[in-house]
Amino acid sequence: IKLESCTFALFGALGDLALRKLFPALYQLDRAGLLHDATRILALAREAGEPSDHLRAIEQALRLHVPAKELTETDMARFLARLSYLTMDFLKAEDYSALLEQVSPQDQLIAYFATPASVYGGICANLAAVGLAERCRVVLEKPIGHDLASSRAVNDAVAQVFAENRVYRIDHYLGKETVQNLIALRFANSLFETQWNQNHISHVEFTVAEKVGIEGRWGYFDQAGQLRDMIQNHLLQLLCLIAMDPPSDLSADSIRDEKVKVLKALEPISAEQLGQRVVRGQYVAGSSDGRPVPGYLEEENSNTQSDTETFVALRADIRNWRWAGVAFYLRTGKRMPQKLSQIVIHFKAPPHYIFAPEQRQLIGNKLIIRLQPDEGIALQVLTKDQGLDKGMQLRSGPLQLSFSDTYRSARIPDAYERLLLEVMRGNQNLFVRKDEIEYAWQWCDQLIAGWKQLGEAPKPYTAGSWGPMASVALITRDGRSWYGDL
Ligand code: BG6
């Protein structure tokens, strides 16, 4: 499948995201032979100076971020030949005539906004003013707003120019291969779908742990915090994919309609319930891989008074027929012992138990979906232990599918490669619709309002640990524990 020719205009082309993720992803699409020969890439940024210097910076970033074995000089030369650099002030209408000259008249324009959301509306208006909007798709990076009101303001400004079917809102978790696999796993296997409800599932755990701290992003992160940075988008999207009803087809709107129903059914958590249902944490100095690391308040450019959270664990409930009474535990944090994204579905025990009483805690199947690293799926099943000396002794072991072992030859593409490919194809399947973002904000806003009302500081946890002890209490209170050795 070779794509049609397009002009890809990257606004904010010298920013961290563009250099670390977007240019490498475009390079990989080109290397895979997917880009049309005539496709051009316009790097747009406000930095003045020699375009050739900026292009060299982009080349250097590619050499740094693309694995050496995937970098050949021929591929690099072909990719760089597609690229040009233009200095622009994105909010100045006059600067768009130079852009207009660079876009081939027949081409579809893809405008990727890797800039603060506050300028999205201005860019859209300026694209419209030079007549580029009619043949343009726009890609919006997160964070879109800071709460429901500000995200509405951004979405409304974009909607002044672009209909929803031209707007591609990024949540890069949706581009991860294993996240897309959730749809295949659930809806291509009748084995799971028949069990996928409160009759058979007791609870579900979502863990998205990161080893890194704030990595020089204190300015952004301190305004956001882990709830806005990770739960409002990535974790709620994962929750939707696990909890949604089967869509009637694979079209973008069928899937997104089902996700919205889940978000609408999320039970609000009142300020009175916060103590029992939600834990906020902030890391203090500790260690990572045996190296000492500073606490959040000692990071570069930090404000020592900040009470922004770097960890959240919570119990969510979905008020519908399928999930009544099932607990969804979400946990995410910076400076955890390892990078790990995993979903664990806990199935209920059989209705009548006939084995030795001391083995009772083994009972209950678990489906473990590992998103990163070591992508794969394992179903924990109980069998009899082998051997003449063993009676009916039970043993829990995995039926396992490791993606890296099974598809050894296939390289797992980065999420952004898939997402850019889908924008070029005009497929909105993996992008977030306006109402999804807004319901997700609505739910998060009430949590944040509750925190404000209580005025409690986040609970400290040592960098390199699994978070505050209260996050263990959150789940043990319900007679459960976080899966594995966590
Ligand atoms: C981003 C957050 O959306 O996701 C970052 O802003 C976070 O804070 C990142 O580090 C995690 O993504 P991944 O793909 O590394 O799990």
Image (tube, grey):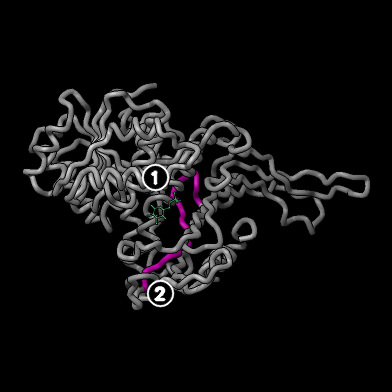
At 23% across and 43% down in the image, what residue appears? 52
Q: Main secondary structure of the magenta part?
A: loop
Q: Is mark 1 within 8 Å of ligand 1?
A: yes
Residue denoted by label 1: 172
**Could you tell me the amino acid type at mark 1?**
His
At 33% across and 75% down in the image, what residue appears? 303
Residue denoted by label 2: 298
- Quarter of the figure that contains the C terminus: bottom right
Residue 379 badge: none
The stretch of residues the image draws in magenta is 307-324
Q: Nearer the viewer, mark 1 or mark 2?
A: 2
| Left/right of residue 251 with respect to residue 149 in the rendered view | right
- Quarter of the figure that contains the N terminus: top left
**Could you tell me the amino acid type at mark 2?**
Glu
Is 316 included in the stretch rendered in magenta? yes
Tags 1 and 2 touching, CB below 8 Å = no
Q: Is residue 284 above or below residue 321?
A: below
* Residue in front for this viewpoint, 201 or 104: 104
At 35% across and 68% down in the image, what residue appears? 450
Q: Position of residue 393 (x, y in %)?
A: 83, 50
Q: Is residue 275 above or below residue 426?
A: below
| Left/right of residue 407 with respect to residue 264 in the rendered view | right
Q: Is residue 148 above or below residue 473?
A: above
Is 394 included in the stretch rendered in magenta? no
Choose the circle earlier in sequence order: 1 or 2: 1
